[in-house]
């Protein structure tokens, strides 16, 4: 342990005394927060409705019955002549109006005599013009469509749905947040954790190999096994710091990306964060082990970076599984699959639909895989052909 700690101390000293590496760890997180906040602001400005906006809706040959429904729904509709249709369309295109409805003449009379069973002509048709790129126009369309659907249903009202029930949707705000976050965060965590590991591991192993300092350690009395374990543990600790900074940035920027509001607060408890932290630690061990193996094979940092790119795509692709499949897997056998089980465990935690057993199984698989990677790295350090190849 003394020798292992000596290697770890050396790695810690190299990291914390190198301002460039510290800045490289912090700047991506800061940049991530700034970019996501900026993107969220832009998305709200482009796609979000104005809070104080009063819908401006025009109608030609306005139906008396529909007007009564609109009045009950506190929707104001401006009746215009047919000659004003093109002008109204222009106002919608210029975002000075939201909606234009053109009713057939004598719409109410046509509806009154229309019979679906015996009709030989199409049903009366309402033309609705809107601007899909304008959030206010799109919301006005949704509201008016719902109103017209309600009016149509009232013409042959045989039964009601949810009359007098205000909270028919049983999904809470926390459920909605968990659904969205669980589809995004596993992939983001996989990418950012791997990126942090890659930058540190490549510099620690391939960088020292390229500079010749690793050869000095290999010919010292230090056992190769101790060197491998010291490297893995120190890199995992430093990667955890790097990943933690990025994760915090992601968690802080996610509410901004989604338009503000309490996206994270009041949804996840200390239990979820504790399980996630334990899972991240074991995942980092796997990432460090795999990247270290690739780094040990490579002769230069450039070569190692190229070789680890497929690994990044692998982790990113598996992280995407949180977006498909209709939620996390429930069968414990899926959590025995390396990396995939980790992604499913992350998804289950963020979805608030997790099993502690499944998370423990996925974490233990990570530990087994990391131990196996450490054993392979030890053998590689013991191989003169691998470590001193030109």
Image (cartoon, rainbow, N blue to C red):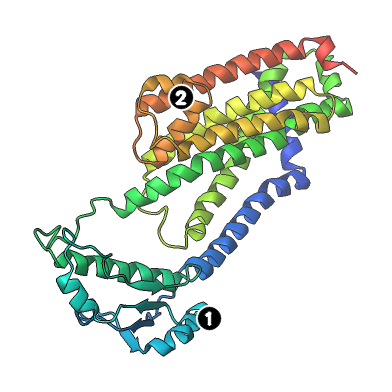
**Residue visible at 24% across and 54% down in the picture:** 169
Q: Residue furthest left?
A: 158
Q: Secondary structure at mark 1?
A: loop
**Residue visible at 58% across and 16% down in the picture:** 371
**Crowdedness near tag 2: few (<14), some (14–19) or many (≥20) residues, C-alpha within 10 Å:** many
- Residue 338 coordinates in the image, percent (x, y): 52, 22
Above or below 31: residue 340: above
User: Where is residue 331, by image quadrant?
Assistant: top left
Q: Decide which of 308, 130 is in the foreground and name it.
A: 130
- Residue 257 coordinates in the image, percent (x, y): 52, 58
- Residue 16 coordinates in the image, percent (x, y): 72, 41
**Residue visible at 23% across and 62% down in the picture:** 120
In the image: residue 370, left or right of residue 118: right
Q: Residue furthest right?
A: 390
Q: Decide which of 216, 377 is in the foreground and name it.
A: 377
Whole-angstrom CA distance, mark 1 to mark 2, is 55 Å
Total marks placed: 2
Q: Which numbered marker is on residue 113?
A: none
Query: In the picture, which quadrant includes the C terminus?
Result: top right
Residue 363 visible in the shown view? yes
Above or below 76: residue 333: above
Q: Secondary structure at mark 2?
A: helix
**Residue visible at 43% across and 43% down in the picture:** 182
User: Where is residue 229, by image quadrant?
Assistant: top right
**Crowdedness near tag 1: few (<14), some (14–19) or many (≥20) residues, C-alpha within 10 Å:** few
In the image: residue 230, left or right of residue 305: left
Q: Decide which of 323, 293 is in the foreground and name it.
A: 323
Q: Give the residue number, with chain letter if any, for mark 2.
A: 362
Q: Give the residue number, with chain letter if any, for mark 1.
A: 94
In the image: residue 166, left or right of residue 197: left
- Residue 121 coordinates in the image, percent (x, y): 26, 65
């Amino acid at each position: 342990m003394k020798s292992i700690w000596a290697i770890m101390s050396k790695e810690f000293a190299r990291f914390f005394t190198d301002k460039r590496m510290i800045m490289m760890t912090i700047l991506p997180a800061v940049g991530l927060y700034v970019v996501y906040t900026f993107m969220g602001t832009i998305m709200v400005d482009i796609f979000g409705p104005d809070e104080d906006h009063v819908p401006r809706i025009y109608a030609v040959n306005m139906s008396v019955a529909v007007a009564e429904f609109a009045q009950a729904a506190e929707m104001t509709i401006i009746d215009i002549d047919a000659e004003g249709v093109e002008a109204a369309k222009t106002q919608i295109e210029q975002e000075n109006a939201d909606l234009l409805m053109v009713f057939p003449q004598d719409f109410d009379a046509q509806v009154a005599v229309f019979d679906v069973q015996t009709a030989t002509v199409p049903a009366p048709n309402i033309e609705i013009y809107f601007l899909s790129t304008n959030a206010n126009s799109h919301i006005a369309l949704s509201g008016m469509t719902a109103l017209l659907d309600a009016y149509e249903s009232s013409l042959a009202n045989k039964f009601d749905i949810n009359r007098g029930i205000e909270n028919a949707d049983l999904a809470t705000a926390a459920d909605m947040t968990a659904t969205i976050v669980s589809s995004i965060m596993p992939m983001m965590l996989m990418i950012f954790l791997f990126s942090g590991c890659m930058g540190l591991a490549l510099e620690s192993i391939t960088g020292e190999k390229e500079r010749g300092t690793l050869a000095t350690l290999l010919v010292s009395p230090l056992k190769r096994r101790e060197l491998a374990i010291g490297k893995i543990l120190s890199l995992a600790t430093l990667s955890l710091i790097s990943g933690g900074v990025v994760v915090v940035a992601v968690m802080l920027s996610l509410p901004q990306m989604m338009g503000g509001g309490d996206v994270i607060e009041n949804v996840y408890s200390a239990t979820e964060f504790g399980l996630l932290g334990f899972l991240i630690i074991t995942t980092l061990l796997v990432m460090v082990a795999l990247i270290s193996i690739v780094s040990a094979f490579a002769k230069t940092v450039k070569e190692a970076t190229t070789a680890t790119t497929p690994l990044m795509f692998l982790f990113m692709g598996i992280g995407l599984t949180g977006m498909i499949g209709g939620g996390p897997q429930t069968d414990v056998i899926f959590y025995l699959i390396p990396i995939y089980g980790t992604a499913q465990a992350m998804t289950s935690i963020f979805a608030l639909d997790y099993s502690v057993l499944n998370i423990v199984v996925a974490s233990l698989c990570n530990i087994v895989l990391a131990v196996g990677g450490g054993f392979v790295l030890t053998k590689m350090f013991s191989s003169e052909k691998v470590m001193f190849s030109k």
